[in-house]
Amino acid sequence: MDMGLHNKTALVTGSTKGIGKATAIELAKEGVNVLINGRNNQEAEQTVNEIRSKFPATSPQNAAADMADPAQRKALFEKYPHVDILVNNMGIYEMMRYDEITDDIWHTYFRTNVLAANGLCQFYLPTMLEKKEGRIIFIASEEAIMPSGQMPQYAMTKSMLLSLSKSLSKLTKGTEVTVNTIMPGPTLSENVHQIIDGIYRDENITFPEKEKKFMAANLPQSEIERFIRPFEIGRLAAFLCSPYASAFKGSPIRMDGGMVPTIY
């Protein structure tokens, strides 16, 4: 299916690995010129070169910056003053006990997972509204609506993104600008892959067997009984960026593999 995105420009934050990279690749498949972002300039450049070699008709660019740093965001705005698509994917997470979370940690999570995305929206959304077209996507988590209690500092920020998305969507009335949130369930990032391999390093079994064993022991509520693949989320993001998804407005879209037990 042609998503009708040829020659659009998209900034995908945290796109040197995981969901962000998969989203950038899926957008590039559709002819989008992706701006690859990460804090590590070399990793961003490597990803740019990889995408350029796979999709030579597109023009990926290095947009390396720490989006949690207002000064670096400002420099990025000067370099890339216009985008058609903004995917706020960057975020940090870690399992922590509530009594271990200091004010500094709360501030770090709020600054990184919420304020960075909000700063990007404050800059790029007005131009989208002026043109009456554009796409903003936040990548949240099932933790936004079903906190496990294992990472309250993370869950709080992801819940905030749902609220921010809905508030910003109210500003888009009468335009073809959309603001939506994707809530992935447990996803097989590079880091997760290494963790699962490490847990069962002494067992002579394949990775799919390790994955199934881990899911049964730790995430039995999953209906797909496996981790979601980043490209699956990237493909959904590409659709939401397309003209065919213009009726999604301020929507929290679950892609959780059946993790959330409620009907809504």
Image: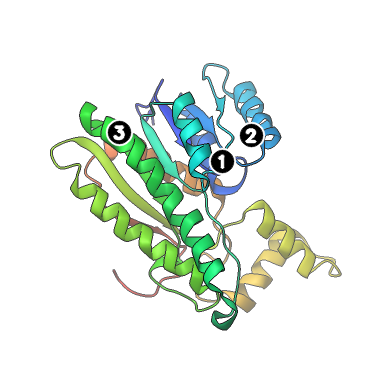
Where is mark 1, residue-wise?
Answer: 15
Where is mark 3, residue-wise?
Answer: 134
Q: Residue at x 55, y 25 (%)?
A: 61
Q: Is residue 222 visible?
A: no
For marks 1 and 2, give the CA distance: 8 Å
For marks 1 and 3, give the CA distance: 19 Å
Q: Provide residue 49's location: percent of width, then percent of height.
A: 66, 25
Q: Where 54 falls versus 24 (above or below)?
A: above
| Secondary structure category for the residue under label 3 | strand
Q: Which residue is drawn at 33% across and 59% down?
A: 162
Q: Which residue is drawn at 67% across and 39% down?
A: 40
Do tag 1 and tag 2 residues touch (Cβ < 8 Å)? yes
What amino acid is found at the position of numbered circle 3 in the picture? Answer: Gly
Residue sitting farthest toward the front: 71
Q: Quick one: 130 or 46, which is closer to the camera?
A: 130
Q: Provide residue 31's location: percent of width, then percent of height.
A: 46, 23
Q: Sequence-wise, which precedes: disc 1 or disc 2? A: 1
